Amino acid sequence: MIPALVVFAYLGVVLYIGIFAFRRFEQRDAEGYFLAGRSLGPAVFLLSLFGTNMTAFTILGSAGHAFANGIVTYGLMASSSALIIPVTLFLVGTRIWALGKRHGFVTPVQMFRDRWECGHIGTVIFAVQAALLVPYIIIAVMGGGTTLSVVSGGVVPYWLGGAVVAVVVMSYVFFGGMRGTAWVNAFQTVLFLSFGMAALMLIGSSIGGYPEAIESLLDSDATASLLTRERVSPRFFFSYTFIPLSTVVFPHIIIFCLTARRMQQFKKTVVLYPLCILAIWLPCTFLGVAANAMHDVPGIAAKLDARALLASGDFSVGAAKAIALQQASAGDDVIILILEHYAPIWMAGILGAGIMAAVMASDSQILALSTMFTKDVFAYYGGTIRFGERAQVQMGRLFVVLITVVAYLIALRAPPGIFNLAVQYAFSGYSALFPLMVGALFWRGSTKWGALAVVTWTASTVTAVAVLQAVVPPPLPGNLVPVLTVGGTDVLTRTPGGTDILGYMPVVPMTIGSGLLMFVVSRLTPKPSQKTLARYF
Amino acid sequence: MPRWFLVLATVTLYVLHQDWWFWTSARPLVFGFLPVGLFYHTVYSLAVVVLMWALVRDAWPAHLESKADVAVGTPGADRPQAGGDH
């Protein structure tokens, strides 16, 4: 139980940091509570921006994905993000900061409403953004439940672990607002960046070095492909380069961009972001792959046995058993199992806290949703005029509680792998909204009707993918189910991990479709006034 | 560095992400344990750091910060727009 106690101590530290921020700074007005008074310093800005973009899948999901799919995990999400996220922060993040500083925006919808001279279309944008953000919050609760359950050896059940995470996050967001969230994120980032390399070296030492483990994987036909990219097609690999486009469209990232004291603070963030990604993703990916050689860890051995049975093609197992085997072979907890087996008990606890740090990064998303609801709905439709400025902060706090409770209740349902859940819904949806941001900031010709077309398309396609994947069950690993075939070509295919459209992930046609709609619909509809355009270009 | 070169470098790096030449290879194992495909993307990530440093040094949009210092109020940020959407 010692690792679990260390993790609980960590949660106590996080709670203290969040509440200390509340006591030390006046946060009576909306800008103080929601944007930390636009006064975050350079170190906190870098660490908290990176930390807020990391989630449960950064450690748990990536290792689990690598456990099943191999080294491809790093190239899929990490190295593509290492390029695209800093470039978009450089081009888009700086513009958002400048516009926020100049015009006083607190949320992206405020900027869109002003840019395109729209009102209720802004509300539609809010609704779609909010709906897409909720899954991101859910995976944090799920990750917390999984972590506490495994670290405590089952003493803390999943439902209680999830509840603890939800209450802790809700509390420091409620009391500390953006300043508390930023400080906690900065602390968490230092913790889980340290975790990566420490875990790699410690576990390598415990197993007697990695060369033997890797050679054993290469010697087996069942595992040799984990060390190449054979399990994934080049088209699928390319598709993932669209996912990092979502980062600069996520409301919590946009709102974070607005908190910098000076634009210069983006410089260090842009340059160091790829290093931060390397520091955490490389160890997690490698450990996930290497776990396939750790047969002496009972939990991992059970997963390998389940996977072998699934791969044997023994159809006598039956559908229910096949589903049970799939769940048994899932690797979302593999890194915790490795730590518990190989790391000294006190170290396992600290490393467990590092995992919790990444897992609990939903704080910014919760605060962002609260900010958006308060400013884009409550204040916009007259709440501030009727109830006063202080009511905005109270309304924001109330929404923090509501969002957390809803996310927790949803998280109690058995999920698919953490990684797939995040990618399929939250990331793909926000990537498809990228043309919205590009249109607003870089193209004078974009209009509110183009924006409406983009959000409608995004909501429709995300829903369509969700319905398809609910109606057509996933096939067993190694199998594909054609859903739509045209002229002998499989256009739409159900895969074990999701859906393919001509071999590409749905995010590719979704984003391209959004871009086309923004262009075509904008060209056919009237532009905003010259006075408005002059404020942006 | 001229901006056209930085744009070209960024696009080139994006294209180089699709390293098909290491797709089915695990060997050589760099340092005795790191599959070559993973090593490639590790070096790729470090190359991105260099590119970002060059972008920040030679293409920083400093004009945005000076524009931002001009405080201009946003009309009706917290009030419904007159006439709504039409």
Image (cartoon, rainbow, N blue to C red):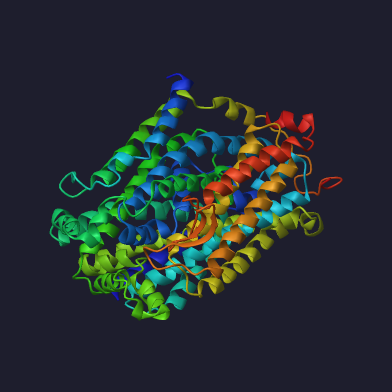
Q: Is residue A522 left or right of residue A332?
A: right
Residue A298, relative to residue A100: is it above or below?
A: below
Quadrant assignment for the C terminus of chain A? top right
Q: Do we see residue B16 in this rendering? A: yes
Return the residue nearer the eye: A404 or A507. Answer: A507
Q: Position of residue A104 (x, y in %)?
A: 68, 41
Q: Position of residue A142 (x, y in %)?
A: 46, 68
Q: Quadrant of residue A79?
A: top left
Return the residue nearer the eye: A12 or A372. Answer: A372
Q: Do we see residue A180 in this rendering? A: no
Q: Residue at x 52, y 65 (%)?
A: A138
Q: Residue at x 31, y 61 (%)?
A: A67
Q: Residue at x 77, y 55 (%)?
A: A384
Q: How many marks?
A: 0
Return the residue nearer the eye: A280 or A332. Answer: A332
Residue A47, relative to residue B16: is it above or below?
A: below
Q: Quadrant of residue B13?
A: top left
Residue A440, relative to residue A189: is it above or below?
A: above
Q: Quadrant of residue B47?
A: top left
Q: Is residue A348 left or right of residue A438?
A: left
